[in-house]
Amino acid sequence: MDPQHFISSGIIELYMAGIATDEEVGELETAMAQYPAVAAQVEAYRRSMETYVTMQGIDPQPDIKASLFSQINNEPNLQEGVPVPDEDLQQPKVVSMQETKSPSWKWIAAAAAVLLVGSLILNYVFFNRYKEFREYKDKYQSLLVSQNSILSKSNLYKTRLEQMQESMEIIQDPKVLKVPMPGTKAFPEALATVFWNPSSQQVYLKVNKLPEPTADKQYQLWAIVDGKPVDMGVFEMGDTASLLQKMKVTGKAQMFAITLEKKGGALAPTMEQMYVAGKIPG
Amino acid sequence: MEYAPTYTEDELVQGLKARDQKVFSYLYDQYSPALYGVIVKVLNDNSSAGDVLQEVFLKIWRHLDKYDPEKGRLFTWMLNIARNTAIDILRSKSHKLEQKIQNIIDDVHAVNGPLAVHPSTDYIGFSRILEKLTKEQRTLIDLAYYKGCTQEEISRVLEIPLGTVKTRMRNAISQLRNIINK
């Protein structure tokens, strides 16, 4: 309701007479708080009512005042003011309804909303951090794994490199004789090489091409010294075969040969199973 | 009263809140006739009106701390105390409503009651008001204001329909305001 409409509605008159309904009183008090024009009208009505009352004033008997003041002076608690709630003291509740109730609700609602929004923001931030953290943790673990594998590979390569270097040194040593052993008639595809240092008597073997034996068999190297076969040891195949393998020592030899024997080697070579053989050059 | 110092409303309130008895004395001199007039009008009982007036001023003195100038003028506050106190006493008596409000219905045009009228009462002004209000308008105002009657009570006592009470009451209060504000 707009203020002018409200003023002409007649509620103010009923309010002044004290016969407005609770609902009407509530509406009026709201309107008074909202529109100064309505509040001014109510005040004008109130003044006219008060003038009406004042005009009918009556002088009280003079002894009432004396009695009142002696009561005030003789009752000390009256000077303190007694905190007794009294309905009669209630002033017209002009704007009190809105002043006392709504702000507290508004503040509580506002505070709750702020807290909720704050909590949601923090939830979001911390959840994101948690997700990031988990990603980092996964990455860290996979890095750790790959670092370990690189480390072990690098160790492997280092070992391989050292072995290769060792092999190179042996091969490049001018004292070392290279004895190629081509395949025999029965195994023409086979090939192996012996590196022999006559001064240190050390014999090395390089397998160039030999078929992989069954699990119960092993190749055995022999040196032929003055027509007799001398055991130079059994050797491994597989990865190990790609390198120079250190065999036994011999001070003399005219040729070298490899036979396939039972696992662990034999005392004498099985001639039918001779795969390669080669004479020492010179 | 001509010899009493005058105070502004602010000075009055400050002095009263400071429990200044001189200021309270001034307050009594200034407003006791109006409050007494209300009490007499409500109770229509000369013997108890003096005691009620004293009770009202004691309440005012005791509860000055509760008066909030932002919610209304001091006189409005005191008038409410006087009116509410007197109406409470009126309503607590075990008489029938018709007996309690008889003075309003019977003697509505009597300016001079059996009691001495305050010398400062504006006879001429008041007579002028009464001339411009009908008997019924004044009865309506007084029943509501001095007796605290509800719409239903007024409707029953004056034997007019409830809706008519509202309409006539609006007119009466509106008329009163127009006369006084002229």
Image (tube, coloured by chain):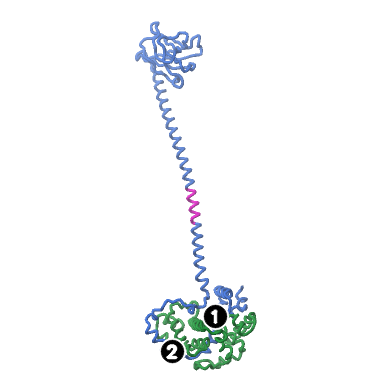
Chain colours: A blue, B green
Question: In terms of sequence position, does the residue under pointer 2 or pointer 1 come before the other?
Answer: 1
Side of B157 where A220 appears, left or right: left
Tell me where the magenta segment starts and ends, as one range. A118-129
> Of discs 2 and 1, which sits in the foreground?
2
At a point 62% along the width and 76% down the height, the residue shown is: A5
Q: Position of residue B43 (x, y in %)?
A: 51, 87
Q: Position of residue A94 (x, y in %)?
A: 53, 76
Residue reaching furthest to the top: A227
Q: Quadrant of residue A35?
A: bottom right
On-image quarter of the C terminus of chain A = top left
Report the residue marked by disc 2: A64
Q: Position of residue B36 (x, y in %)?
A: 49, 88
Report the residue marked by disc 1: A43
Q: Residues within 10 Å of mark 1 (few under 14, many from 20)?
A: some
The residue lying toward the viewer, choosing from A51 and A56, is A56
Query: Looking at the picture, does residue A30 appear above or below residue A235?
Result: below
Determine the secondary structure under disc 1.
Answer: helix
